Image (tube, grey):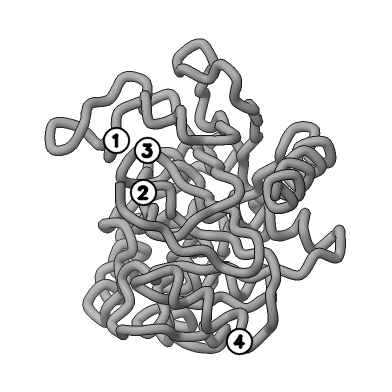
Amino acid sequence: MLPTKRLEGPVVSVGNLSVGGSGKTPFVILLGELLKARGIPFDVLSRGYGRQTRGVLLVDPGGSSRDFGDEPLLIARRLDIPVILGEERYQAGIFAEQKFGPRLHLLDDAFQHRALARDFDIVLVTADDARDHLLPAGRLREPLTALQRADAVVLTAGAAPDLFSVDGKLVWRVRRGISAENVPPKPVAFCGIARPQNFVLQLRKAGIEPSAEAVYRDHHAYTENDIRELLALKTQSEAGGFVTTEKDAVNLGAYFSALQPLAVVPVKMDLVDAANALDTMLRIISERRNRP
């Protein structure tokens, strides 16, 4: 019922139904890589969750998660495209169009941010979403019926189409894994992400058995005390080093060099039949924007 504002460039939202990790950031990076391969100019608009700044800001890839938030900083570094922060995504979009001209906008974590009109809505779901409950009893921000607003439903983490109401929707499937290279022997595995058990499970699937594990809250900003505790854990467990996620590497900031040897394991996400999915999305956007 609330009025929505429209930007000059097309808007694609990437979101989910639940609080916590469903792979939104890896999917934004994946979609961005597909757009870059086609030569399509775009930016990413985000609220910058966890940042200690306010207002509209252009992310500096060399900056800190304290100023820009860990996920926007990771996106900016991985994609090398403009990432603009704003509590109101419309204002961030206006800034982007004034600075870079009209282009496609990817909205990060914006399925519930309905103040900005979008041309295509992508929603990621996990198998857990189908069994979950609404906040505060569970992790769902909205009921499963909210998927009716989506254009494409992305099945992640073992989700199957028969668990959701996806009739008439595009159903996309992604494969998610890690790229574990140069990992020290018997490492201390540590992370501050929404689903830490998935990270440890992926390590074990890759043949990496941690000597010890340390788990922090999602978006954790590491402190000097954390570093001391991790180094003590390395000594106690006789570990050969450390292994963590890309997001945690961003949140380590200046402490990164204190934890050596440290392997940073990127998430690798692949979209099944990606070329067709992107073609379909771009065609639908074009049809909608060309309607009289």
Which three-letter amino acid code belongs to the residue tagged 1?
Glu
Q: Which residue is mark 3?
A: 17
Q: Which residue is at a point 64% across and 35% down the rendered structure image?
A: 174
To which residue does mark 4 refer?
Answer: 98
Whether residue 227 sits left or right of residue 119 in the image: it is: left
Tag 2 and tag 1, C-beta contact below 8 Å: yes
Alpha-carbon distance for marks 3 and 4?
Answer: 32 Å
Q: Earlier in the sequence, mark 1 or mark 4?
A: 4
Label 1 sits on residue? 142
Q: Can residue 159 be seen at all in this image of the molecule?
A: yes
Please tell me which of labels 2 and 1 falls first in the chain. Answer: 2
Q: How busy is the neighbourhood of tag 4: few (under 14 within 10 Å), some, or many (20 plus)?
A: few
What residue is rendered at 34% in x and 65% in y?
Answer: 235
* Gap between marks 2 and 3 measured at Cα: 8 Å
Please state the horizontal and vertical placement of residue 196, each as a whole percent of the image.
Answer: 37, 46
Q: CA distance from mark 2 to mark 1?
A: 9 Å
Q: Please tell me which residue lies in front, 98 or 175.
A: 98
Q: Amino acid at mark 3?
A: Leu
Q: Is residue 219 left or right of residue 241?
A: left
